[in-house]
Image (cartoon, rainbow, N blue to C red):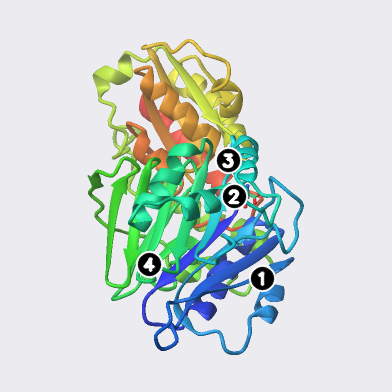
Amino acid sequence: MCGIVGYIGKRDVAPLLLEGLQRLEYRGYDSAGLVITGKPAAGKPAALKMVKAKGRVRELEARVPKRFSGTTGIAHTRWATHGAPSDENAHPHMDPEGKVALVHNGIIDNASELRRKLEADGVAFQSETDTEVVTHLVARSQAPTLEEKVRQALQLIEGTYGIAVLHADFPDRIVVARNGSPVVLGIGEKEMFVASDVAALVSHTRQVVTLDDGEMATLKADDFRTYTTEGSRTSATPTTVEWEAESYDMGGHETYMHKEISEQVDSVDRVLRGRIDDRFSTVHLGGLNLDAREARGVRRIKILGCGTSYHAGLIGAQLIEELARIPADAEPASEFRYRNPVVDPDTLYVAVSQSGETYDVLAAVQELKRKGARVLGVVNVVGSAIARETDGGVYVHAGPEVCVVSTKCFTNTVVSFALLALHLG
Ligand code: GLU
């Protein structure tokens, strides 16, 4: 899953999109592309203009023509799942008429079946991607509004997606949707942003709305609204991102890894601050939502995470057994969610994730909630999907972790488990 950036407002959009893509480069990708709604010539409808390139964002930048003005656009960095990295497979994907342009993070599970049907209907595909089927489905919809066209397309697809869509006949808006792949709206003054990661937004606005799974949004320059894929309105009050734009910069270090290792003294200080109670030798965790009676009823603790978070969870389980004397273990969330686990009412489940968006962890949380379990989160990104879906939890307060290798967030997660263990003890 890679990066999405979009903008609608008054400013020249191409430089904004390229800057946003650069801020997402840390996630790794194999190609990039962008599309803008060009200024309509007199008497003519708006036309979409697209540039794509295999390779780095700077190669894309080199291909953007000198005259490329517009104030609405969407962009993407791709990490190929269907089809090799190439110019053709890079996103956005457009329909043959050039009306619809779409970028997508995630995987469409029933893409080959839909592709066969569309090809039998005479649709000529330009790429090998799963994403292109969604573009054609939107373009072929006869619905009167862009929102309805996207909704009809989404009803036919199975899989995970964060998508952003432009349509030449609806040049005043960007329509976005989320299912299992993050989409964050950035709310500005007479301008709106969208991205798959706040890193791409924070230099412009810190007012954000994070979409839930099954949610869509329409962004116009001076307005936005959110609704479910079934069409009912949802309330979306913007929250303020606590991290400064500068915390995403390298700050004089040669690599993000070096920067983040050296930040650990401060980040550990932050996770402890205001939580230690020396007088009673315990800790206070504001957002845990687990009172003393409930805590005493916990017979077992099951920690779920992926990768580094799972490894922090292994240490967490040992800390909990040692300090709270409650049997505890950690399991990779990707295994747990596929093995039809017994969900026990006396077990406390703890979901661990830096981003708060790790798909297998989120899916495990959703499954546990469906089965009536109590689930806490140990999460770094405030307001992320896992933070919202859990009953309470501990924020790790490591600050933004840009390096793919986790350092300060691993340390802070382990410290968070020490706090949780002390609290339960
Ligand atoms: N599945 C899509 C593709 O292969 C999107 C991959 C991504 O999330 O970057 O093009």
User: Where does the image place residue 31, in percent across and percent down from the top left?
Assistant: 69, 62
Question: Is the Cβ of the residue at disc 4 closer than 8 Å to that at disc 1?
Answer: no
Question: Is the Cβ of the residue at disc 2 closer than 8 Å to that at disc 3?
Answer: yes
Question: Is the Cβ of the residue at disc 2 closer than 8 Å to that at disc 1?
Answer: no
Distance of label 4 from label 1 (alpha carbons): 28 Å
Distance of label 2 from label 1 (alpha carbons): 20 Å
Question: Which of the two labelled residues, at mark 4 and mark 2, occupies the earlier sequence position?
Answer: 2
Q: Depth-wise, is mark 2 or mark 1 nearer the camera?
A: 2
Distance of label 3 from label 4 (alpha carbons): 25 Å
Helix, strand or loop under label 1: helix
Q: Residues within 10 Å of mark 3 (few under 14, many from 20)?
A: many
Disc 3: residue Cβ within 8 A of ligand 1's nearest atom: yes
Helix, strand or loop under label 4: loop
Q: Depth-wise, is mark 4 or mark 2 nearer the camera?
A: 4
Q: Nearer the viewer, residue 12 or 417?
A: 12
Question: Is the Cβ of the residue at disc 3 closer than 8 Å to that at disc 4?
Answer: no
Quarter assignment of residue 193: bottom left
Distance of label 3 from label 1 (alpha carbons): 25 Å
Question: Which of the two labelled residues, at mark 2 and mark 1, occupies the earlier sequence position?
Answer: 1
Question: Residue 131, labelled with which disc?
Answer: 2
Question: Is the Cβ of the residue at disc 3 closer than 8 Å to that at disc 1?
Answer: no
Give left or right: position of 350 versus 411: left
The residue singled out by tag 3 in the image is 108
User: Where does the image place residue 121, in percent across and percent down from the top left?
Assistant: 60, 44
Question: Which of the two labelled residues, at mark 3 and mark 4, occupies the earlier sequence position?
Answer: 3
User: Where does the image place residue 247, in percent across and percent down from the top left?
Assistant: 50, 66
| Residue type highlighted by circle 3 | Ile
The residue singled out by tag 4 in the image is 170
| Residue type highlighted by circle 4 | Phe
Helix, strand or loop under label 2: helix
